[in-house]
Structure formats: C-alpha cells, structure tokens
Image (spheres, grey):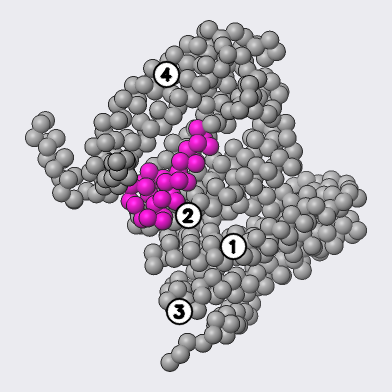
Amino acid sequence: MTPGSTCAACVALFRRDLLLAWRRRGDIAMPVLYAVIVTTLFPFALGPDAALLSRIAGGVVLVTVLLAMLLSLDSLFRSDVEDGSLEQWMLAPQSLPLLLGAKLLAHWITSAVPLIVIAPVLASMLRFPTAAMPVLVAALLLATPLLSLLGGVLVALTAGSRRSGMLLALMLLPLCVPVVIFAAGAVAAAQDGLPFAAPIAWLGAALALALVLGPLACAAALRIAMDA
Amino acid sequence: MANWVPLWLHKLGSPPIFYRFAGIVRPWALTLAILAAAVALYGGLVLAPADYQQGDAYRIIFIHVPSAWMSLFIYGAMAVAAFVGLVWRIKIAEIVAMESAPIGAAFTFITLVTGSLWGKPMWGTWWTWDARLTSELVLLFLYIGVIGLYHSFEDRRQGARAASFLVLIGIVNVPIVHFSVNWWYTLHQGSTVRLVGPSRIDASMLWPLLTMMAATKLYYVASLFARVRAELIASEGGKEWVRAIALGEDARS
C-alpha cells in the first residue's frame, strides 16, 4: 500500500478535526461563554462609568480572548495522545510539521474564530468606540493565530507529561507579552486617533515568522516530549 | 598537539569523571567566592564614597547589578548546555542546564527584590511597569516555567529534554520581550558600565562591583557543581561507580 500525498493527509486531518469539533458543538461554545462571563464581570467590579469602561475596553477584550484561548489550548492534543493518533502521525511518512499545521489551523477555526466574532459585541458592551472597532478585529485576527501557534509548541512540550493547565499558562505568559503589547498598542492608538499601522505591521511580521517556524518547532517539541 | 582539550571535554561527559572533577573544583570555587564577596562588600559598603545624588542608597548596586548580570549569564549558560544536551544527547549537559535553572531563578529574584528596595526611596515606588523591570520579571517566569516543566515529567531525562527545548524558545523570546517592552514604556536608567570605551562610573565604585561579579560567578560554579553532584548520585544510583562511592564512604565512617 502506498501512502497518500502530504496534501491529502493534511486535508483529511483538517476535515477530521473540524468534524470532531462539530460533533461536540458544546465544547466550542465554552470559551465563548467564558469570554462573555469575564467581560460581564468587569463593569460590576469597576462601576458602570462609561468613560472608564471605554478606556479599558480594548485591553479587557484582548486579555479575555487570550485567556479563553488558553482554556481551549490545554486540550489541543489530549484526545490524540489518549487514543494513540498522535503516535500514528509521528510514524506517518507525511511531514509532521505540515500535519500539525493543518491541526493548528482547524483548532484556530474552532476556538479563535468564534471569539473574534463575539469580540465586537463584548467591546460594545464596554462602550468601546465603534470607529476603532475594525482595528480591534484586525489586531485579533493577527494575534489569535500567533497565540495558537505559540501555544501549540508549548502544548506539544507538555504532551508527554502529567496534565497541568497552570503550567501551560506559566510557560505561555513570557511568549504572549509581546503579542499583547503590540495588539493593545494598535487598539489604543486607533482609539486615540493616532496612526496604528506600525504595531499592526509588527504583529503581521511576527505572524509570518510564526507561520513558518511554529509548525516546525511544534513537531520538534512533540518528538522530544513523546521521546521518539 | 592540542588534542588534549577535546579529549578532556569528552571525558568530562562521563558521569563518574564529572563527579570527581566537580568534587575537586567546588570547595575552591566556594572559598574564593566567599573571600571575593567579603572583599567586595568591604570595598562597596565602607571604602567607596557616597554618591553625590543618591547618598548611601546607591550601595545596593553592589548586590543588585551583579545579580542582574548573573540572571542573564546563567540563562545564557543554561541555553548553551541545553543546546549541547539536545543536539548530542549528553546527559551531563542536560543535568547542568536543569540544575542551573533554580540558581538563575534565585539571582533573578534577588535582582527584583533589591531593585524594588532601591526603587522605593529613589523613584518613590516599589514597582513600576518599566522595560527592564518587566523583562526581568518575564525572565523569572521563564525560569519558573523551565523548572515546572522539568518536574512535570515522570521520566527525568524526558523532562530535561522538554525543558531544554523551552530554554531555547526562551532565549529567542527574551530579546523580543525586551525590545517590545522598551517600545512600550521605559523609566530605568541606561547601563553605566561598558565593555568598550570608558565606563561612566568612578574607579572606587567600579572595582567592588567587578569583584562582586567574580564572586557571584564563582558562587554559581560552586552551587551548580554541588547540585549536579547530588543529581548525578540520584539519577545514576544503582550503577557501579555510585555503589563504590557509597560503600567507600560507609567503610570510612
């Protein structure tokens, strides 16, 4: 039996992951619900002052989306480690980085896209100015795949270990500091009517770099963590 | 020929030889570290004049600055050891990388604590979201992440290899964090001691600083070797050379 082409394998894996996510639609809703709950709590904690809320809205939405993604990242490889599919991919003749790239893309679509869709609603709840909304969405569109890729590498490192969600958060924090700074910088600049092209460009550059290196690092990390 | 250098390094990769080598070096490094630290503290706290602007409060730099240098130096050393361990699968290199992490974390913590003690009278605040402070805090999180990842594996070598990979990710990340935070906001003063060109610090203050730097380096060596020896005994337990040491010490006592 000859193995299928890498492209076919990636598409098959991508479809499988989307199908699995669709069969468990409730799991997709959990991060969104989490983001809604966290954002709802902020006005209760800080008071309903519109000026204050609109000032912090961009940052609150960004951090909330980041935390919600962290919640879903934890289970990225869990079921695949448990049922042994991960070992099969590592043994497969197709290139592991590309397979993992397809998997991360499916994960981004199922976990981050719903969050990006809900983000403008959350931001409006916090009186975020409508004029700056496109910049917020653009920053999220660039920052969330970056977080997915960075998180994917770290989740791969913990794949062979005892489960610890807190450990993942601890490891991701140093990596996501620059992402948060540039995303929030762009949003704040747009809110103040300043040029926001530079931080957005930096995010784009980082994303281009992560798109190339992320799956490679993820594959290397998996091979180390699973001790292949 | 100069063939003995690679040969010696190669031999050092063997656990029993490294164990004996570390046992010989450690007491010397520790003694020299204590002597140098005592001299540096005397020079810094007694001999050096008070600063014309900051008074006596500046004297904390004799602890703060060497610790800050060490926090970065140890990360660099750890990254080199992690790289060697990952590429050539040398057990000693993995152990050196993993045992460096707690020492580096301790120096980072000392840097943060002394910095905020100095910041209170000088800047009027314990903590500020300044570029250098934030980078140092991120460095501390990186160290803790490495230690946490190492201990989350059942198998020590597997944990060491995974954590080594995290160390290498971190070394790419530290400059990015520093640059991005710098772009974000900064308050900390620039560096005063330079490798190239004249330093903007008086000689009477410089020599205790450099002596203290030597002391912290020597302390790192002493502490690292003690930790590596303990880890070697623990992980190699049951091997012939460990049994020989254990029996030999039993016979002596």
Image disc number at residue A213: 1
| Quadrant in the picture for the N terminus of chain A | bottom left
Earlier sequence position, callout 4 versus callout 2: 4
Q: Are marks 3 and 1 on the same chain?
A: yes
- Residue B232 vs residue A89: left or right? left
- Are the residues at dot 3 and dot 1 in contact (C-beta closer than 8 Å)? no
Image disc number at residue B165: 2
Q: Using the image, name the chain to which the residue with label 1 belongs.
A: A
Residue marked by disc 4: B36
Residue kind at label 4, given as amino acid type = Ala
- Total labels: the figure holds 4
Q: Using the image, name the chain to which the residue with label 3 belongs.
A: A
Q: Position of residue A42 (x, y in %)?
A: 75, 51
Kindly state the secondary structure of the residue where label 1 is placed.
helix
Asked if the magenta segment contains residue B199, the reply would be no
In the image, what residue occupies the spot 72% across and 49% down?
A: A181
Disc 1 and disc 2: Cα gap in Å?
A: 14 Å
In the image, what residue occupies the spot 53% across and 59% down?
A: A154
- Crowd class of label 3 (few under 14; some 14 to 19; many from 20; radius 10 Å): some
Q: Measured along the vertical axis of the image, is residue B119 above or below residue A45? A: above
Residue marked by disc 3: A92
Q: Position of residue B22 (x, y in %)?
A: 29, 35
Magenta stretch in the rendered image = B70-98
Q: Position of residue A121 (x, y in %)?
A: 81, 64
Residue kind at label 3, given as amino acid type = Ala
Q: Is residue B18 visible?
A: yes
Q: Using the image, name the chain to which the residue with label 4 belongs.
A: B
Kindly state the secondary structure of the residue where label 4 is placed.
helix
Kindly state the secondary structure of the residue where label 3 is placed.
loop
Q: Are marks 1 and 2 on the same chain?
A: no
